[in-house]
Structures are given as C-alpha cells and as structure tokens.
Amino acid sequence: MKLQMVDVVGQYQKIKPEIDAAIHKILDSGQFILGKEVGEFECQIAGYLGVKYAVGCASGTDALQVAMMALNIGPGDEVITTPFTFVATAETIALLGAKPVYVDIDPKTFNIDPSLIESAITPQTKAIIPVHLYGQAADMDPIMAVARKHDLKVIEDSAQGMGATYKGKKVCTFGDISCISYFPSKNLGAFGDAGMVVTNDAALAEKMRMIIVHGSKVRYYHEILGVNSRLDTLQAVILSVKLKYLDQWNAARRKAAATYNDMLKGTPVTVPYVSPNGEHIFHQYTIRAPRRNELAEHLKQKGIPHAIYYPIPLHLQQAFAVPGTGKGAFPITEQATDEVLSLPMHTELTDEQIVYITDAIKEFYH
Ligand SMILES: *Cc1c(COP(=O)(O)O)cnc(C)c1O
C-alpha cells in the first residue's frame, strides 16, 4: 500500500482545473509581485478568520519576525514561549536579539501551560507567543488574562492552527498579532513558501505592511527598518482557490482522526486529547506510544510513513543553549519528545489506509 504523510499532489488533482486556471491568469498578467489578487486574498482571510487586517508575507517564519519587529521587540527583551514547537517560533525571537524564555506544556494538549507563565515573567518580558500545536488551540483565556495583567503583547503562532476554534471563535483573533504559515504541508498550503500576519490593530497593520516592503509606504522612501517578505501573487491565487475547501478539508481530517481513534482502541497508545474548548483541525494526528522508537522502526519496515514532531525540545537545541535550562528543565516537554509519534494525516487518507496503519500498530504491541 502506498502511503504518504501528506498528499499534496492527490489534493491538487481534485481541484486541478480551478488551480490551473488561476495560475494561468497570473502568468498572462505578469503581475507576480503584490498584484491585486494578494489584496483580495488578504481580505478573504480576514473575513474567514473574523479579523480586521491581514498582510501577506513570504513565510510563517517571516510572519513571526515581522510581528515582533512591529512590536519593537529587540535586544534586552524577553519573549515567553513553549519549548515544544517548530524552531521558527524561538529562532525569530533570537534573531531579533531578544531572549526566548520557555514555559513547560500541558501534558494533554501539548500546548503552553498557562498556569506556569506568570512565574516566568520578568521586568524584561515583552510578549508571549502561544503555539496552536498540531491544530489545537492553546488555552487563550488564561494566556490573555496574564498578558493583560502584566501589560504584555500576545502573538499567536497559528502556523498549525488554520481553522481551529477556541470557545466559538477562530484562533488568530485573540492575540495582538497572529502569524500564519501557508507552507505546502499546512492545513491551508501554498505551492511554495507563503505566510501572513493578521491583527485588529490598524496601526500595527500599517506598520507591518511597511516592514514587509523594506520599511516603506512610498517606494524608495524608507521610514523604518524593514525586510523583503512579500506574498507572491501566484501563491495568493492558489491559496484563494484552496481556502474555499478549507473547512471541508479540516472536517475530513477530523473524520480520519475519529477513525484512527476507533481503530486504536484497546492498544497501549494514547490517542490525541481533544479539549472541549474548541475544534481541533488535526494538522497532525499525534499519539503517545510506549517504546516509541521501536514502534517507529516497525512502521518503517511496513512502509508506513511517520514523523516525530519534535525530537529535541528547543531548550536542548544546540543553537539555543541557555544557561540554567539544560536537561530536566522542562520535564513535561522532554517526556513528550520521547513519546510522541505523528501518523499520516491528510485530506486524501482512506479508511483502508487507516486500517492498514493501525493493524501494523496492533501487530507491534501484540
Ligand atoms: C511551520 C511552522 C512555522 C514556520 O512556518 P514556515 O512557513 O515554514 O516558515 C512556525 N511555527 C510553527 C509552529 C510551524 O509549524
């Protein structure tokens, strides 16, 4: 059986005529950089999420950097985030000269534990970056409460959360700024790198719109320090076609997750916890597995793709070695890195494939 972690080609085949027509229109127009379609797509996303402003940029990583630049985060500042995330969340903090300060996670959701945030706040703390890991919203109410109490900014890293909800509202509507990645494997994926920042704050939106084009409002007049980080017109039209299917695709992922849950009943693995606070969009279907590395090897033998997101927590990454945060500093995160295993999850996954995958897991634990 041919299995893939993510099936971007299979998904494209289903909407090929629409995508191809959109691409050819741009090829014929020659408007590759900031064409009017970028603005149209920004409006569609703002409408979808329920935010006032959306500004496209070149990647989710850039979105984080642009957001922090807009909030004047730099040398001497501290930013609180989770050590259990993709490197970009902390890398951009460090690139701007600020210090990532980690807070351990909730063992059920894998998201930052809000009850641990307050004790990590210092006079240098400027912002908190919760991550909606695997497609499940971080617990935003207590995060926003502690942020407001200490006058901190909140940036949602929603690279994995496109379409997820928290208490009836979409993620990306809680923080001061939220960051989206349209990396091909994300729930709403482009055909290359792409990203976006969204906000309800007009001044921040205007500033971010300047930052992404070298800090200028008028070409060749540079008012603030910026970068070159634009959303390609081609990616904007592709994403615009795909956005129409996003809810349907997220529902397909939820259905696949439910099938996995059923099939894994009675095995020693822990299936993903779904918080009653909102809708999980299963960017990843991630189990906790006893003897995880041996199980991974068994799946490999059977030709079943799988991944470990993430094998090394950020506080133990060589690039981020910070005195005082060595092994043992964040035990819940460290345990998660030893136990998690993500199984194939995408919109084209069939029940037969899920049965094949879960049969291999049952065989391993038999
Ligand atoms: C993918 C991802 C990013 C970075 O997005 P890119 O578009 O790949 O730069 C940032 N944070 C998290 C949590 C991610 O999963």
Image: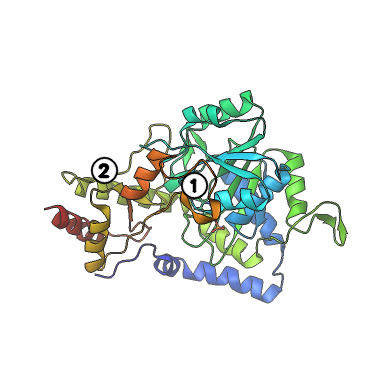
Rendered position, 206 above or below 213: above
Residue carrying label 2: 270
Q: Secondary structure at mark 1?
A: helix
Q: Quadrant of the N terminus?
A: bottom left
Residue 313 appears at what percent x and percent y? Answer: 44, 49
Q: Is residue 282 left or right of residue 217?
A: left
Amino acid type of the residue that numbered disc 2 sits on in the rendered structure: Thr
Q: Secondary structure at mark 2?
A: loop
Q: Given the current orientation, which residue lies at the most extreme left position?
A: 366
Residue 193 appears at what percent x and percent y? Answer: 57, 63
Residue carrying label 1: 315
Residue 350 appears at what percent x and percent y? Answer: 28, 60
Which of these two is toward me, 288 or 186? 288
Q: Residues within 10 Å of mark 2 (few under 14, many from 20)?
A: some
Q: Give the CA distance from mark 2 to mark 1.
A: 25 Å
Q: Nearer the viewer, mark 2 or mark 1?
A: 1
Q: Is residue 262 visible?
A: yes
Q: Is residue 351 visible?
A: no
Residue under the image location 71 percent in, 48 percent down: 69
Q: Given the current orientation, which residue lies at the most extreme top position?
A: 149
Residue 122 appears at what percent x and percent y? Answer: 62, 30
Residue under the image location 67 percent in, 59 percent down: 38
Which of these two is toward me, 205 or 138? 138
Q: Given the current orientation, which residue lies at the most extreme right position?
A: 221
The part of the image, by quadrant, that contains residue 32 is bottom right
Residue under the image location 63 percent in, 39 percent down: 78
